Image (cartoon, rainbow, N blue to C red):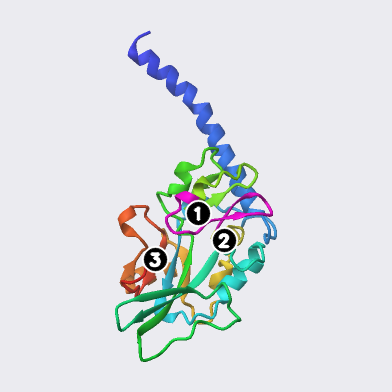
Amino acid sequence: MNKREFLKKGAIAFIPAAAVLQALMRQAEASVAGAAGATGSPTPGYEPRDHWYGMGIEVEKCIGCNRCAEACKAENDVPPEPFFFRTWVERYTVKQSGETEVECISVNPRGERKAQDEREVLRSFFVPKLCNHCAHAPCVQVCPVGATFTTADGVVLVDSTRCIGCRYCIQACPYGARFFNHRTNTADKCTFCYHRVVKGLLPACVEVCPTQARVFGDLRSKASRLVRFQRMNKINVLKPALNTEPKVYYAQLDGEVR
C-alpha cells in the first residue's frame, strides 16, 4: 500500500468517527438545554455555530447585593448548602498597609459581614465570579470520558449522564469555578444558563442584576451589548498569563484581583 492509499483509507475511517462525535455533542447539548429550569426546546431554527457567547462585568457597578448568586441557585437547582455556587461575589478590601483581604459575601449574604475600620481601608469593591467558559478550557482537556465539552456556540458544559465524578476537571480549573454536586455525584458549574440562552433569554444572573453590572451577549454580532461593552471599556480577564482565553470580561478591574 502506497502513502496515498494509506491516507485515503485513514480519511474514510475518520469520517464516521467524526460524525459519531458530533452526534454525541449535539445529544449532550440537548441534554443540558433540557436540564432543570428549562421550559421547552431551543428557539426554532437556532444554529449554535452562528453564535459565540461571553459575559462582561462592570466592577464599578456591582453593589454586592448577591442577587445574582441567589437567582442562579433558584434557576439551576444548585444545592442549598451555603458553600455551593455556580456564581458568587467576593469583596476585596485594600488596606493602607498594602494588604488585601478577600471575603466571599455569598457564603452568608444575610448575615453580618466582617467589620472594617474605615481608617485602615484604602479602597473596597465587589467582584462577581463564575466559570470563564474558556476557549482553551483546561477542564475539557483533562476529562477522561469527554463529559466536559465546549459547544459550538462557545459554552463549556458538563454532560451529567457521562460524568463519572472523578473530579479531574475540578482540580484543573484555575478559577475555582467548579464543585462536586453530592446529589448527582457529578461535577457542576455555571452553564451561562444555556437552557435559557438557546431560547433567546438572558442568564438568570444577568436578568436580576439591579445595576446592570453584568452584560451577556454574542461576540459574533456587531449589535451585541457585549461587543459594545468591550469597545467602550478597558477590558481585563482573570489570570491572562494562563492563555485559557476566558470569555468573561471585566471592566475597571483592580490590579489586586486574581
Query: Quick one: quadrant of the N terminus?
Result: top left
**Residue 215 drawn in magenta:** no
The one of 252 and 254 positioned closer to us in this rendering: 254
CB-based contact (under 8 Å), mark 1 and mark 2: yes
Q: Which of 138 and 34 is in front in this view?
A: 138
**Vertical side of 52 occupied by 234: above or below:** below
Q: In this view, does 211 lie above or below 141?
A: below
- Residue 59's image quarter? bottom left
| Three-letter amino acid code at the position of disc 2 | Val
Q: Measured from the top left, where is residue 31 in percent x and y?
A: 64, 48
Q: In this view, does 18 lie to the left or right of 174?
A: right
The tag on residue 155 is 1
The disc labelled 1 sits on which kind of residue? Val
Name the residue carrying label 3. Answer: 249
Magenta-colored span:
171-189
Query: Farthest residue in the top direction?
Result: 1
**Which mark is first along the chain, 3 or 2?**
2
Label 3 sits on what residue type?
Tyr
Label 1 Cα crowd, 10 Å radius (few <14 / some 14-19 / many 20+): many
Quadrant housing residue 35: bottom right
Which sits earlier in the primary sequence, circle 1 or circle 3?
1
Disc number placed over residue 229 in the picture, else none: none
The residue carrying mark 2 is 197
**CA gap, disc 1 and disc 2:** 10 Å
Q: In this view, does 238 lie to the left or right of 200?
A: left
Confirm or deny contact between disc 2 and disc 3 (CB under 8 A): no
Q: Where is residue 203 in the image (x, y as percent from the top left)?
A: 56, 66
Secondary element type, mark 2: helix
